[in-house]
Amino acid sequence: MIIKPLSRQLKAMAETVVKAPSKMGMSPTVLLAPNNISSTSSRVNAKDIIGSIHEFVAQIPHAVKQRKDDDIEPGAFNDPVTKLFRKTTLSPHDWHRYAWFDESVPYTRNLIATDRKTYTLLLLCWNAGQESPIHDHPCDGCWLKVLQGDIREVRYDTQLNCVSDETFGEGALSYITDHDGYHKVGNPSNRPSVSLHLYAPPFQRCLSWRTQDKEQACVSECSNFSEYGFKVR
Ligand SMILES: [Fe+2]
């Protein structure tokens, strides 16, 4: 199940791209002007909306534990983690300090928070027209929310047959587990995009494929470009 993204029309109204100063000579962080349009806020009581990344992070451990204790399928309507994502509306001012871009790689992985045993929260910054290889997720679940721009997700079954190809806009939420299959994620547009990824529990390496030949798997090490807002690579 995929929670539907904002309509194209609303997204176009919402997005205004501005550039912030460069960090340490790297490509500039790209910010969106704040807006009040979110696919999540319309389904949640205003008093329940989480509007800061600190509050969001603080609630992750409980949500992850509750989902596991109650054996709820990731992404199910009553999944506590999905609920947490659904009621969270983050301003670019909350996440821009983690948004490191590097034009020499397709995308960067930027660590926001982790307890090193039950979850890790990453901000992925995608250059225009770039994508990941097909990959698995050796964890209980991966949740993904689009924070800026467009994100394309191509899904495959466990035999690497393509089963869906969708492009999501800002506010869209998706999830995947190895039980569902594998995916590749990318930025199909001609401007940068940013997505928020939660993995529970964390993992250091995964399998990836450059083609749909399942026999040609590679082991990919998952390294961060920045951690807690500071470049580490
Ligand atoms: Fe993934």
Image (cartoon, grey):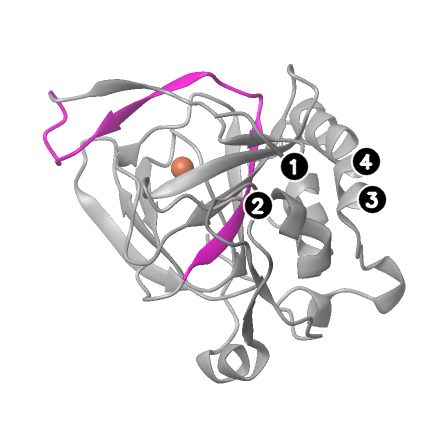
Labels 3 & 2 near each other (Cβ < 8 A):
no
Query: Does residue 63 show up?
Result: yes
Q: CA distance from mark 4 to mark 1?
A: 17 Å
Decide: few, some or many residues near mark 3? Use Cα within 10 Å; few <14, some 14-19, many ≥20: few
Q: Amino acid at mark 2?
A: Lys
Queried whether the magenta region covers residue 140, the answer comes back as no
Decide: few, some or many residues near mark 1? Use Cα within 10 Å; few <14, some 14-19, many ≥20: some
Q: Quadrant of residue 143?
A: top right
* Residue at disc 4, CB closer than 8 Å to ligand 1: no
Residue drawn where x is 19% and y is 46% of the image: 162
In the figure, is residue 162 to the left or right of 28? left
Q: Amino acid at mark 1?
A: Gly
Q: CA distance from mark 2 to mark 1?
A: 10 Å
Which residue is nearer to you in this view: 3 or 129? 129
Where does the magenta region start and end?
A: 192-215
Q: Nearer the viewer, mark 2 or mark 1?
A: 2
- Per the image, the residue denoted by label 1 is 229
| Relative to 207, residue 109 above or below | below
Percent x, y for residue 220? 31, 20
If you read the primary sequence from the N terminus, does the residue marked by circle 3 or circle 2 appear first? 2
SS assignment at label 4: helix
Specify the label residue 23 is tagged with: 2
Farthest front residue? 25
- Per the image, the residue denoted by label 3 is 55
- Per the image, the residue denoted by label 4 is 58
If you read the primary sequence from the N terminus, does the residue marked by circle 4 or circle 1 appear first? 4
Decide: few, some or many residues near mark 2? Use Cα within 10 Å; few <14, some 14-19, many ≥20: some
